[in-house]
Amino acid sequence: MSAVLAPLRRWPGQQPLLFLLLAAAAWFGLYQTLMPAAEALVAALPVERDSHLSGALLFFFYDMPKVLLLLSGIVFVMGMINSYFTPERTRALLAGRTEGAANVMAASLGIVTPFCSCSAVPLFIGFVQAGVPLGVTFSFLISAPMVNEVALTLLFAMFGWNVALLYLGLGLSVAIAAGWVIGRLKMEAYLEDWVRDMPHTAATAGEDRLSLGERLDSGFASVREIVGKVWPYILGGIAIGAGIHGYVPEDFMASFMGKDVWWAVPLAVVIGVPMYTNAAGVIPIVQALLAKGAALGTVLAFMMSVIALSLPEMVILRKVLKMRLIATFVGVVATGILIVGYVFNAVL
């Protein structure tokens, strides 16, 4: 336990439910002040009302605290939930299960487990040692970074629950289908030899004796770790989004990211793969692109490729996978993302 949070924990540890109620009331009260505060701040600045600069500044001053506040609150709650899903427990839940239903379970666990692409290698090794089928492992590894609390929080903050739930369904579908396809291809031979030859070990769930106060500690730790890492991406993404919102002409993005341009979706995927960012950085940009005429399916494909097929993750996975399996993984996931983009451009 961190000494930094010791003063905070003494009181919540005695009255954790009361602490949660008071914290929630303070959070909601602060959230209600964001728009009036942003409008007052812009009005106080020496900028012309209704100008491009005024619109960009209002976008930034409202979205920046709103996203950080929403992210901190939901990451705190998810940190408490994540305390139930340690790596050992996740391995135990997936070990020995057959494909199909196991792919669904693995993708669903990816939503509530605090793992990202940087955890890919140790998680992959642990799953192989626990006897988790290769396709099931991939369903988890696709879902965990792509459908996580950061992505869903930011989508909710900027687009509402409809788009957030849409992305949740799409992300789960891609993770489940891609994992199932990879499992059917029987590509265990394309694991690196040292990984394939590792002895299997039994996966145990372990005991869970954490108190509510200790789970509060886990929530605070998640806020420090996750928000502490992603806030620069959030500021950068919102700054770019504010520039697009304020200065890019209406419907400009429709010329190359619209519904009527057949190559828009594959181009969005190709552009997204080499980008070194995450949901925190890309979603504010997605919001601005949509406002300027880009099609929803195209920007969702772009966002998914940035998060699920990033070049850094491929470099990390190269330590445990041979190139043929990495290429198959990229091809299957990219195909799923392309289908998502085209379908939603067609129906929305």
Image (tube, grey):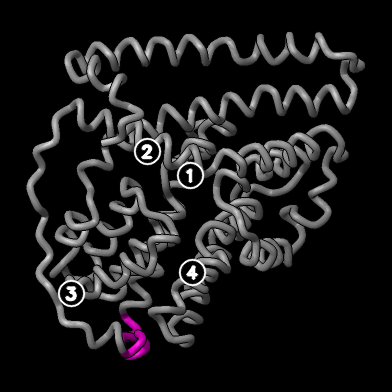
Q: Secondary structure at mark 3?
A: loop
Q: Which residue is labeled 1 in the image?
A: 166
So how many labels did they put on this image? 4
Report the residue at 75% width, 54% height from top. Answer: 257
Q: Which residue is labeled 2 in the image?
A: 222
Q: Is residue 303 magenta?
A: no
* Quarter occupied by residue 165: top left
Q: Secondary structure at mark 1?
A: helix
Name which residue type carries label 2: Ser
Q: Which residue is labeled 3 in the image?
A: 131
Q: CA distance from mark 1 to mark 3?
A: 32 Å
Q: Earlier in the sequence, mark 3 or mark 4?
A: 3
Q: CA distance from mark 4 to mark 1?
A: 18 Å
Q: Which residues are magenta?
A: 184-193
- Closer to viewer: mark 4 or mark 1: 4
- Closer to viewer: mark 3 or mark 4: 3
Q: Would you place residue 286 above or below residue 178 in this image?
A: above
